[in-house]
Amino acid sequence: MSAPVKALPAVDLDARWALHPQVALRPESFGALLYHFGTRKLSFLKNRTIVAIIESFPQHPDMRSAISAAGIDQSACAPYVRALATLADSKMITKL
C-alpha cells in the first residue's frame, strides 16, 4: 500500500513574491543553498534557473513575469511552478 501524496497548495503566479525575510540564499557551484533561520531548514537548489527566478523576484511585479524573464515558455513552466510551490510550502519564499 502506498502512502498518500501530499498535494501542494496552488501558487499565485500573479502575486509578487520574495525570499522569506528569515531566509538566506547562498550561491554554490551546484546552484544555491537556502537556509531558513526561523525553522532551521536547509534546501539545496540544484537548478540554476530556479535560483535565477528567485533572485529576480525584486525586479518583477509577479511570479509569472519572473518565470518568463528567465526564458521559460508558458508551455514549459509547470516543473518550475511545482518547484516554486514546494519552496512556498516550506516557507522559503513568501507572497508579498
Image (spheres, grey):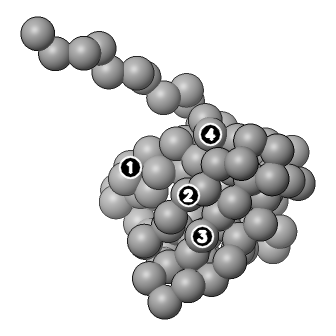
Mark 1 or 3, nearer chain start:
3
Q: Is residue 52 left or right of residue 3?
A: right
Q: Is residue 85 above or below residue 6?
A: below
Q: Does the rendering let one see residue 73?
A: yes
- Along the line of sight, the residue nearer the viewer: 48 or 81: 48
Q: Amino acid at mark 1?
A: Ala
Q: Amino acid at mark 2?
A: Ser
Q: Does the rendering let one see residue 60?
A: no
Q: Is residue 3 left or right of residue 60?
A: left
Q: Nearer the viewer, mark 1 or mark 4?
A: 4
Mark 4 or 3, nearer chain start:
3
Residue at x 60%, y 70% (from the top left corner): 33
Q: Amino acid at mark 3?
A: Leu
Q: Do the CB atoms of the residues marked 2 and 4 lie less than 8 Å apart? A: yes
Which residue bears the numbered disc 4?
A: 90
Q: Quadrant of the C terminus?
A: top right
Which residue bears the numbered disc 1?
A: 78
Residue 2, position as x, y percentages in the image = 16, 16
Which residue bears the numbered disc 2?
A: 43
- Along the line of sight, the residue nearer the viewer: 82 or 45: 45
Residue at x 48%, y 29% (from the top left corner): 8
Q: Amino acid at mark 4?
A: Ser
Q: Is residue 53 left or right of residue 36?
A: left
Q: Do the CB atoms of the residues marked 3 and 2 lie less than 8 Å apart? A: yes
Q: Is residue 47 above or below residue 86?
A: below
Residue 3, position as x, y percentages in the image = 24, 15
Q: Residue furthest front?
A: 40
Rendered image quadrant of residue 23: bottom right
Which residue bears the numbered disc 3?
A: 33
Q: Quadrant of the N terminus?
A: top left
What is the spatial separation of the Cα atoms under label 4 and label 3, in whole angstroms?
Answer: 14 Å
